[in-house]
Image (cartoon, rainbow, N blue to C red):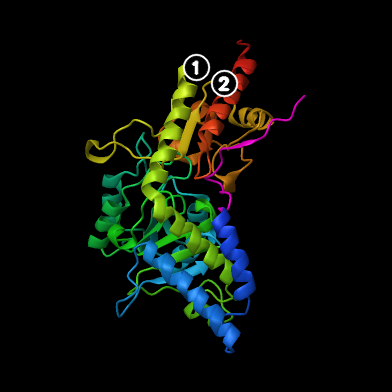
Amino acid sequence: MPVVPPIYLDHNSTTPVLPEVAVAMAECQQSAFANPESQHELGRQARRVLEEAREGIAELLGANISSRQPDRLTFTSGGTEANNLALFGLAGPGPASILISAIEHPSVSRPAEALARRGWWVKRIGASASGVVDLEQFAAALQEADAAGQRPRLASLMLANNETGVLQPVELLAAAARDRGVPLHTDASQAVGKVPVDFRRLGVTALSCAAHKFHGPRGIGALLVRGDVAIEPLHWGGFHQHGLRPGTECVALAVGMHVALASFHREQAARCQRISLLRDRFEAAIRAAWPNIVIHGAAAAGPAGASVERLPGTSNISFPGFDRQALQMALDMAGVACSTGSACASGSREPSPTLLAMGLDESLAQSSLRFSLGATTTEAEIDGASKRILGVLATATGRK
């Protein structure tokens, strides 16, 4: 049996590093290899390269780095650490109450559960059938007191859902939180480098992102925090990054993250349009031959009747009558790499909390797969993946 080349449609899990990113990192490893905390010339040279990358990333994210209290960008090992730093670092002494949505990534929902085990009161905000966080429920929760009579201390709501790709009205949510004096953190790991993101325009207190989601290297992410906000560290052991995240920074990873984000910003309009068209082409091909599929977040109404927007490259599809894990394995054998949901929940037999929060019945949630495209996805790959998927479906049902 001939081996078919795999087609990668799992970019929401991680993306291949762009060639220009790899080149920049390799050059950095040679020219800025020293410890950026060292006081000698080579250390100072590495520090300059590191801070140029830090400032460049912050500027591309829309941070204010020129004021008397500049916004602060702290490098982390990725989005998970950044989210943990945000929740535990911004929450302050407790117990108190915290608001999250019912569709958060495990790197937010599980730290919230850890706070709950410490006596915190965690309120989960529901979502509509289209996958959008309920604005009215959030506004009401901002005024709701916990068992100790305290109002929420912190809110954390994602910018783009990792499973459906649905963009959340974070700007509106942040404004509502700000009116009540509640800091709001947003997990923007799936949005940064895929759609335009402006930290100051969003009005959030803190924002998390991860380089490997937008064709940068694995092993680095960042937490961007407003300049006038205090945050406590998770770890101790040094004065690195203003004491917020001790440990020697990897200059090459920071450079790779900067180059990858700059690449997106140079071509963001064309890249977003091209990937959106490929996603639409993919969904149309599947639906034409298999009309009973359900595409989540594709054509529903959001707040005030506005159409719901998705990330350009995310397609979450339910195949009624199929088991998602069995179908994912069959597609893997056919050379299509996709996922059953969040990579951090890979292998779980439990249905997606996101899809259940949207009101899907369990059988439909158990038949869903996530296909995600990136900057390197081609039209030929989309057409090839569609044919392979339809072939697997036909074989499984005995169709010719």
Residue stretch in magenta: 1-18
The amino acid at mark 2 is Leu
Residue 389, horizontal then vertical, whole percent: 58, 25
Against 115, is 243 above or below? below
Is residue 2 found inside the magenta-colored segment of the image? yes
Residue at 27% across / 65% down in the picture?
181
Work out whether residue 153 can be spotted. Answer: yes
Q: Residue furthest bottom?
A: 40
The image quadrant that residue 32 belongs to is bottom right
Q: Quadrant of residue 68?
A: bottom left
In the rendering, which numbered label is found on residue 33? none
Which element is circle 2 on? helix
Q: Nearer the viewer, residue 8 or 368?
A: 8
* Residues tagged 2 and 1 counted as in contact (Cβ below 8 A): yes
**Which of these two is toward me, 232 or 123?**
232
What's the distance in space between the residues labelled 2 and 1, CA to CA? 7 Å
Q: Compared with residue 280, is residue 95 higher up or lower down, i.e. above or below? A: below
Q: Quadrant of the C terminus?
A: top right
Is residue 184 located in the magenta-colored stretch of the structure?
no
Q: Main secondary structure of the magenta part?
A: loop
Q: Position of residue 359 (x, y in %)?
A: 41, 33
Residue at the image position 54 percent from the left and 54 percent from the top: 212
Q: Would you name the residue on which mark 1 appears?
A: 289
The residue where tag 2 is placed is: 390
Query: What is the count of numbered marks?
Result: 2
Tell me the residue at 28%/59% (across/down): 201
Amino acid identity at mark 1: Ala
Q: Is residue 33 left or right of residue 212?
A: right
